[in-house]
Amino acid sequence: MSEKKKQKHKKKKKYRVFWFFAKLQIFLLIVVAAAVGWYYFGGYAQTVSKLQKEAKALVRASDEGTFRSVETSMVYDANGTLVSTLKGEKDVYYLEYDEIPAYAPAAMVSIEDKKFYSHNGIDVKAILRAAKAMIQNGKVTQGGSTITQQLARNIYLNQDIKWERKIEEMFIAVELEKIYSKNKIMEFYLNNIYFGNGYYGIQAASRGYFNTDVNNLDLSQIAFLCAIPNNPTLYDPVQHPENTIKRRDRILNQMKDDGKIQVDTCEDAKAEEIVLNRPQKTKSDYVETYTYNCAIRELMRRQGFEFRYKFETEQERSAYEEEYDILYGECQKSLYTQGYRIYTTIDLNMQQMLQDAVDNGLAEFTEQNAEGIFTLQASAVCVDNHTGYVKAIVGGRNQNLPGYTLNRAYQSFRQPGSAIKPLIVYTPALERNYTPDSVVQDVKTEEGPSNAGGSYEGSIPLRYAVQTSKNTVAWNLLEELTPEVGLSYLEQMNFSRLDKQDLRPTSALGGFTNGVSAVEMASAYAAVENEGKFREPTCIVKITDAQDNLILETENQEKEIYKSNAARMMTDMLVSVVRDGTGRGLALSAMPCAGKTGTTNDNKDGWFVGYTDYYTTSVWVGYDMPKELPGLSGASYPGNIWKTFMEQIHTGLEPVEFLPYIDENNYDYHVVTPETGVPEAGQ
């Protein structure tokens, strides 16, 4: 190429570059102009200005007392009796900055906000990263918040993830930095952040997890505590200690990289074994834990959270559980600071009766594990059939152990055995032209199950198959229905641990991957009693603020699961179970009742679930670590606990017969007579 052509080519290239940047600048000016127009004419300028004014007013009205205050929440039973109080106790455990070990601020700065000592309350680069994540994810996330912003959110704002809250959070953070020193802000922060399990502030956390003052802790223990606030549910030291340890190690590595600790100090701290030493407190264990769980879920629902129980993929489940844990933790925190008044349907008199029935029913079993907990356990739940609300809940035998223990009634999931048959086999079959008088085949098939006792009786009425709990009949009927259809009924009643592997005939006998809880079984049987209409179990009636202004009120909405006549027929057959079948001898003395036994292989789990017009109660008995209990069946220990409790709570109540069903094949009404339990036909 000649020199002349080269010069001409360079001029063209410069010309193209010039116009490229000129066009780019024009485009950017248009974008900026559009953004400014959108900001002002769309009303956002007014909103932002208002938020800024509010932020200034909030901070100017504050003093150091603002960061010490806390409101106590209170829980009441059905009769207005105070059950428990929830208080973060910040005032009691508040520490001045010079009383806080130096490792704690250092750890928090390294893991949460490296520019804490240089920014003015907000980190612009971090905000831009958060904005990019918002655009990618389609929603605002928690990313980008400085320590000052986190303090602003905890003290002044709720946990919404709307853009308005984020903007106001930034304004408040900037205003706080104008009034308070960095050390004072760090002091406020470490005294106000949530460390899980009701502990607000690092001193309360130290007392709660290690039973000592924070200045007695070493580096490893302090980093362990500082791991919790990022997600108190995920990093809960009691429920998920392995997660807490992983984040502790990450914090220590960050401190090493930031030059705050030496390499050998970091490695020694990571190698240290963390042993919790929680102080002993006696509480109304099972009522409190269930009540708090119900209250938290209602607060989550109020924020628009949609609870799910079925997922197509593990990734979908994992994403849901992460979102659930974050909001659950935020709502849990509010119980300790917002001064709620929580009104429940728990009846403490019934609660004591149910606890006594469980304790006395298993009193002969005294074996304990290394932690001093009885190895043979039970759970039980009573639902009011007229309302669908939980009246009493027992998550284990009472030993007055320190702190909260496992509430097996809603936290443990066990194989239901034959107690599941009415829910996924028999009532669905009754919706499809079967009746209690339909003839079914009790025969052994090549791949089918065996009956208890190993006998088979050929052609028998469906009623007889139910009252004698024939495995063969349940298996064959579920194959006829298909497991997909049978399990769909449990899905509609929010059974939370169903698995795709449960779509098999063994589910007809209660052979599940994960199992069911006593709460789930009680609410499902209550739906059968309620003519097929399900009501989600809860014990929360309403929640108000400290001035008794209504925050939320539950609506016990009914959802039809089974057809009314099918549910009535099922009840009629379950009356036969307690009079002439596997539950013989468990019928109440002066109240019509129905129920079903359930026993798993090798007598590892025993269930009895039964009801009257008034109440439904489910009872499970077994070992926490499943093993055989000779003599365990649904009719033995679970049945006796059920009968003891149900006899007591029905004392003085007027006997009420169950509603009769219609045999749609011959249009006869049927009802079981209280005297004999034999079906009696009438027009």
Image (cartoon, grey):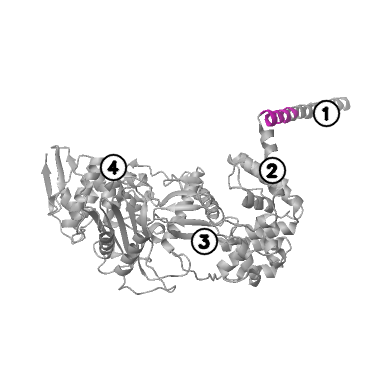
Could you give the CA–CA distance between mark 1 and mark 4, rounded to whole angstroms?
A: 78 Å
Is residue 331 highlighted in magenta? no
What residue sits right under mark 3 in the picture? 240
What residue sits right under mark 4 in the picture? 562
Q: What element carries label 3?
A: loop
Of marks 3 and 4, which one's residue comes earlier in the chain?
3
Could you give the CA–CA distance between mark 3 and mark 4, rounded to whole angstroms?
A: 39 Å
Of marks 1 and 2, which one's residue comes earlier in the chain?
1
Label 4 crowd bin: few (<14), some (14–19), many (20+), radius 10 Å? many
Of marks 2 and 3, which one's residue comes earlier in the chain?
2
Horizontal relation, residue 557 to residue 321: left or right: left
Q: Quadrant of the N terminus?
A: top right
- In the rendered structure, which segment of residues is drawn in magenta? 29-41
Residue 445 seen in render? no
Above-or-below relation of 452 to 25: below
Tell me the amino acid under the disc marked 4. Answer: Tyr
Label 3 crowd bin: few (<14), some (14–19), many (20+), radius 10 Å? few
Label 2 crowd bin: few (<14), some (14–19), many (20+), radius 10 Å? few
Residues at circles 1 and 2 in contact by the CB criterion of under 8 Å: no
Q: What element carries label 1?
A: helix
Tell me the amino acid under the disc marked 1. Answer: Lys
Q: Residue 223 carries which label?
A: none
What residue sits right under mark 1 in the picture? 14
Which marked residue is nearer to the observer: mark 1 or mark 4? 4
